């Protein structure tokens, strides 16, 4: 009898895995057929997303069985395959690298040849160029894009006489893979969650383009150090500041950290973290122009941000449909947020860091439009969600939603789930605010 039940359970596992795989493949294939947005396509994508969401949750809910199937050794497969693909590129064979990037949104080409680290090349090509640095001008870029990078970073690279794109991209990517393996070994994220995240479109796209890999390396390292001793805080503050000079969006994390972590940070670390705020305030015009000359991307896959709803990029009928769908999902996740329980035996600084990351995502979503590789911020968010909250059904449902957002980021409905994530994060923050006000009133009453 027990053998019969074991066979039935195994069949159910295979069915769930097969369903998950079919939905995942659909998310990779459907973008090739969504050039012309129509209601039938939107509804079919939503139905596939719901099935995918359920199968993701059912898979994650088996977190006790997962370590028996997936361990850190599995995370060596992607880096090794990636390195093999780079070697094959050097031999003129692009097939494997192109295949890997089908999990993202494809790679970039120059004269029919694969061009790796295409966005990072924006910096390195300008650094080896003698043309005066001017935002909005084409400065030796292989793709003839107007410059939208920090001019002072380019000036620094010219001063250091550094312009080696391959070494900069390769070293940062290998460090990223090492970080992912370390996260797996320390079991800081559900192994299935981490594995799916690693091969999701935003992360694969970020690896191919290069820029955001450097940014997230600096951010995750800094967050770990900022809750340590004064020396660690000093190093962590420098790393976070470097990320905010390198790209604009980490300034949101710095602002949030100065609010939520103000009681823990010592005065010197705070002083260092204020530097990029002063810098970008002085160079506000440059920041504005950098945003102006950054490609917004299509809201029908690969781009997110509430600003898409206030431009002509999405027609009114779809805006109404997307908002209503988001509202329905938000009601469900409102009750999930209520049932999130904070761990009692955690470091008291984990929650302020999580709040900083959640609010940073909300600000990125609310104040601009971004390519989906910026969803790489979900990696530190997942780490600190698991550090702060008890692993229960609501947390696994929230993780499933994050994974769904990553996997559907190439679909026309990507704005539904990126919006829903922002609303859910806001609900978590508001819930904490209400609890803190209630606790303060009780203390005052006593």
Image (spheres, grey):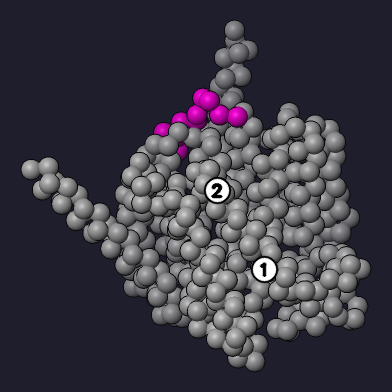
First in sequence: mark 1 vs mark 2: 1
Q: Which quadrant is the C terminus positioned in?
A: top right
Along the horizontal axis of the image, is 58 left or right of 76?
left
Residue 333 visible (yes or no)? no
Highlighted magenta segment, given as a residue range: 332-347
Residue wearing tag 2: 183
**Residue 230, image quadrant:** top right
- Residue at disc 2, secondary structure: helix
Which mark is drawn over residue 170?
1
Quarter of the image for residue 153 reads bottom right
Disc 1: CA contacts within 10 A as few (<14), some (14-19) or many (>=20): some
As helix, strand or loop, the secondary structure at mark 1 comes to helix
Q: CA distance from mark 1 to mark 2?
A: 20 Å
Q: Measured from the top left, where is residue 144 in percent x and y?
A: 73, 84
Image quadrant occupied by the N terminus: top left
Left or right: 443, with 343 as reference point: right
Spot the residue most to the top.
Answer: 446
Asked whether 195 or 331 is in front, the reply is 195
Asked if residue 340 lies in the magenta stretch, the reply is yes
The residue that appears at 69% across and 35% down in the rendered structure is 227
Q: Are marks 1 and 2 in contact (CB under 8 Å)?
A: no
At which x and y percent is residue 343?
50, 29
Please give left or right for residue 263 compared with residue 8 in the image. Answer: right
Horizontal side of 51 relative to 217 (left or right) equals: left
């Amino acid at each position: 009898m027990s053998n019969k039940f074991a066979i039935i359970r195994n069949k159910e596992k295979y069915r769930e895995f097969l369903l998950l795989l079919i939905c995942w493949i659909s998310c990779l294939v459907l973008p090739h057929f969504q050039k012309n947005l129509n209601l039938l396509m939107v509804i079919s994508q939503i139905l596939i997303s719901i099935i995918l969401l359920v199968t993701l949750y059912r898979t994650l809910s088996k977190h006790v069985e997962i370590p028996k199937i997936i361990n850190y050794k599995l995370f060596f497969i992607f880096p090794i395959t990636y390195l093999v693909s780079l070697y094959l590129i050097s031999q003129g064979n692009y097939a494997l690298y192109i295949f890997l990037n089908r999990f993202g949104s494809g790679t970039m080409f120059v004269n029919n040849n694969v061009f790796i680290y295409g966005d990072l090349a924006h910096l390195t090509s300008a650094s080896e160029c003698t043309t005066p640095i001017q935002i909005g001008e084409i400065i030796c870029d292989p793709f003839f894009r107007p410059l939208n990078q920090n001019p002072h970073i380019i000036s620094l690279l010219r001063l250091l006489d550094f312009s080696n794109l391959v070494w900069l991209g390769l070293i940062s990517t290998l460090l990223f893979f090492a970080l992912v393996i370390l996260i797996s070994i320390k079991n800081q994220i559900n192994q299935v969650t981490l594995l799916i995240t690693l091969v999701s479109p935003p992360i694969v796209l970020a690896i191919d383009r290069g820029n955001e890999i450097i940014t997230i390396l600096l951010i995750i390292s800094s967050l770990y150090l900022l809750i340590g001793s004064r020396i660690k805080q000093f190093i962590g503050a420098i790393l976070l500041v470097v990320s905010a000079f390198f790209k604009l969006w980490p300034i949101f994390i710095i602002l949030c950290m100065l609010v939520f972590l103000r009681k823990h940070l010592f005065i010197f670390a705070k002083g260092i973290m204020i530097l990029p705020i002063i810098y970008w305030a002085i160079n506000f015009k440059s920041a504005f122009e950098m945003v102006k000359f950054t490609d917004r991307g299509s809201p029908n896959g690969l781009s997110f941000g509430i600003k898409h709803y206030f431009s002509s990029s999405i027609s009114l009928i779809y805006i109404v449909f997307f908002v209503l769908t988001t509202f329905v999902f938000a009601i469900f996740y409102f009750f999930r947020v209520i049932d999130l329980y904070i761990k009692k035996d955690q470091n008291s600084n984990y929650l302020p860091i999580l709040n900083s990351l959640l609010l940073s995502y909300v600000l990125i979503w609310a104040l601009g439009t971004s390519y989906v590789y910026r969803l790489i911020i979900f990696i530190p968010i997942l780490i600190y969600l698991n550090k702060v909250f008890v692993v229960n059904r609501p947390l696994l449902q929230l993780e499933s939603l994050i994974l769904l957002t990553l996997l559907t980021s190439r679909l026309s409905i990507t704005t539904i789930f990126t919006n829903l994530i922002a609303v859910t994060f806001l609900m978590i923050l508001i819930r904490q605010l209400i609890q803190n006000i209630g606790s303060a009133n009780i203390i005052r009453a006593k």
